Image (spheres, rainbow, N blue to C red):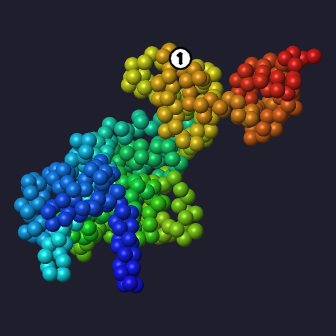
Amino acid sequence: MQKKTHGIWDKRLLYQIIDSMADGVFTLDRKGRISSWNPAMERISGYTADEALGSTCAMLQFNRCFGKGCPAGIHNCGIYQYGSSEAKECFLQHKNGHDVPVIKNASVVRDENDEIVGVVETVTDMSELDKARQRAEEASLRLGEMHRFNNILGKSREMTGVFRAIKAAAASDATILVQGESGTGKELVAGAIHFNSVRSEKPLVTVNCSALPESLLESELFGHVKGAFTGAIRDRMGRFEEARGGTIFLDEIGELSPFIQVKLLRVLQEREIERVGESDRHAIDIRIIAATNRDLYSLVRDGRFREDLYYRLKVFPISIPPLRKRKEDIPLLLSHFVRRQKDKTGKPAARVSQQALRVLMDYDWPGNVRELENAIEHAFVLCERATIELHDLPIEIRRTEYRAGYLGESTHDINVSPPSKKLTREILLDLLEQCDWNKAEVSRRIGISRTAVWKYMKKWDIPLKRS
């Protein structure tokens, strides 16, 4: 009795493991009918377990089974002849009719008398990886158009320094570390360096180091040989080899695991790579540009990033300032994004109103230039006039006008507290006196709208005119 109970629990555990798997798993009985169908198969195929059970795997219309289409009957299937199939990339047809890229594997199951009692098949969904490959291919076609100096806009002192650094970097072959917050344009800087260098006719390959787990990133960067791991059905060239003669851009370098850091250090030192699953080394001629929005030196001090790799990457560092520290560039960027959206949409909007501009200049832009570009695209969705008004901007930016009345940066000749101090009744009264109760002048000095000034006066029971 105890042995039987133990067997029941073993089966329950097995079913729980199969049901929790990310890969699809289904089984066929002796007659080739589907006898089990885990939740992942429901997600991948669109067929529920109730719809699948009792049917044959022909319902999935795999386009490759032992090098040919799915046979009409289970006993004609090559699985009975070969006993198993090697993992292969193919397509199954979703219930809705579209093709789903998968890796498929199958094996027969035998009883103690070596008689075949069924078949177990696993299906790995490759949709996301397939989409990522397509995006990478499409992006590579656009790189030559996107990454030019004229796509990095700015006339501020900070950006002038960035332009000088880009020109110096493009003239050398040194390893570059681009540092800056998210949305500042690190990829544009990497592209400008590449397309203005002697390597411009060769590939620029971009890899986001935070987008993949360690095991997949290792294969993505270094490639693999057939059989290196489950699903490695053929030799595959890595991104370092794809960039041969050109430039590889490693974005979010601060997210690398210690293991990948060691392998990258070897590439930087020896200019050689080893594919996953082999010991042969391949020499590579590439230029490496890395980027991060994190403080790598702090990661080094905390023991989360190798010090030797840090200094190998930081041969020539370029720091991109956040938009809040170069606000004089905002009008130039606005003109560029407005012109781009006007050409793209055909809408009449061609300028930004003074009220909207004032709020855009006052906003801190945590998402930097990318957030500014998105704000203009948002405005074009709403605006049907020739001028973008305040109410066309995203709500989080419009709230700048009313949020706690922080003082702007234009406080010269005003004897008030520092710009970071919150607006109070006493400060507002002092400003009204200095401006001879001219609300428009007060709003200009503070950096908020005249309407906001009136609201604060009403809130604090301040008369509209000097009493």
Among the 4 quarters of the image, the one containing residue 354 = top right
What secondary structure is found at the residue carrying circle 1? strand
The residue carrying mark 1 is 387
Q: Is residue 137 visible?
A: no
At a point 39% along the width and 19% down the height, the residue shown is: 346
Q: Nearer the viewer, residue 349 or 194?
A: 349
Which quarter of the image is occupied by the C terminus? top right
At a point 42% along the width and 46% down the height, the residue shown is: 187
Q: Amino acid at mark 1?
A: Thr
Among the 4 quarters of the image, the one containing residue 440 = top right
At which x and y percent is residue 233?
19, 64
Q: Residue furthest bottom?
A: 2
Q: Using a 10 Å C-alpha cutoff, classify the residue at mark 1 as few (fewer than 14 neighbours), some (14 to 19) or many (20 or more).
A: some
At a point 39% along the width and 44% down the height, the residue shown is: 192
Q: Is residue 459 left or right of residue 51?
A: right
At which x and y percent is residue 253?
45, 58
Q: Is residue 279 left or right of residue 189?
A: left
**71 versus 370 height, above or below:** below
At which x and y percent is residue 208?
40, 54
Among the 4 quarters of the image, the one containing residue 431 = top right
Q: Is residue 82 visible?
A: yes
At a point 78% along the width and 21% down the height, the residue shown is: 454
